Image (cartoon, grey):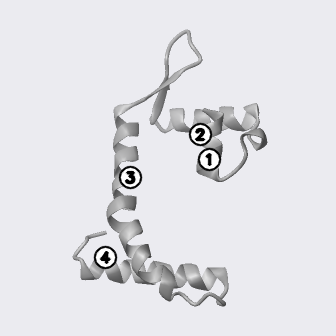
């Protein structure tokens, strides 16, 4: 699980120690997204966790990916990263408005 978690964070698995992994699992468990199986060191996704995962997957597939695909080539390459992010956010927002997607 540490390897998958490292990929999500864009880090190497060696950079994520046991303490950090324990902290992240505890956060997910306290938010009700996962539950620990009794007498094991395994976790299972809850119904709420599955709903959250599906929501973010759909937001990415239906809003972020199409919206970003239309504006990333038009963002000035020499502008600061924060300005590019602001331009991208405004463009995604206008794309959602044009496609009648409610926030």
Tell me, for residue 60, which label it has, or none. Answer: none
- The reply to whether discs 1 and 2 touch (Cβ–Cβ < 8 Å) is yes
How far across and down, in percent of the image, does residue 44 sit? 45, 26
How crowded is the residue under tag 3: few (<14 C-alpha within 10 Å), some, or many (20+)?
few
Give me the residue at 34% from left, 33% from top.
47
How crowded is the residue under tag 1: few (<14 C-alpha within 10 Å), some, or many (20+)?
few
Give me the residue at 61% from left, 41% from top.
5
Tell me, for residue 4, which label it has, or none. Answer: 2
Secondary element at image label 1: helix
Q: Viewer-proximal residue, 30 or 68?
A: 68
Mark 2 / mark 4, whichever is N-terminal? 2
Whole-Å distance between the Cαs marked 1 and 2? 5 Å
Residue identifier under label 3: 57
Residue identifier under label 1: 7
- The reply to whether discs 1 and 3 touch (Cβ–Cβ < 8 Å) is no
In this image, 6 relative to 50: left or right? right
């Amino acid at each position: 699980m540490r390897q998958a978690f490292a990929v999500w964070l864009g880090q190497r698995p060696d950079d994520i120690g046991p303490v950090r992994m324990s902290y992240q699992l505890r956060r997910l468990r306290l938010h009700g997204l996962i539950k620990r199986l009794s007498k094991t060191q395994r976790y299972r996704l809850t119904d709420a966790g599955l709903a959250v995962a599906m929501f973010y997957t759909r937001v990415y597939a239906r809003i972020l990916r199409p919206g970003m695909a239309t504006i990333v080539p038009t963002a000035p390459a020499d502008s600061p990263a924060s300005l590019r992010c602001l331009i991208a956010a405004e463009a995604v927002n206008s794309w959602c408005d044009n496609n009648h997607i409610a926030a």
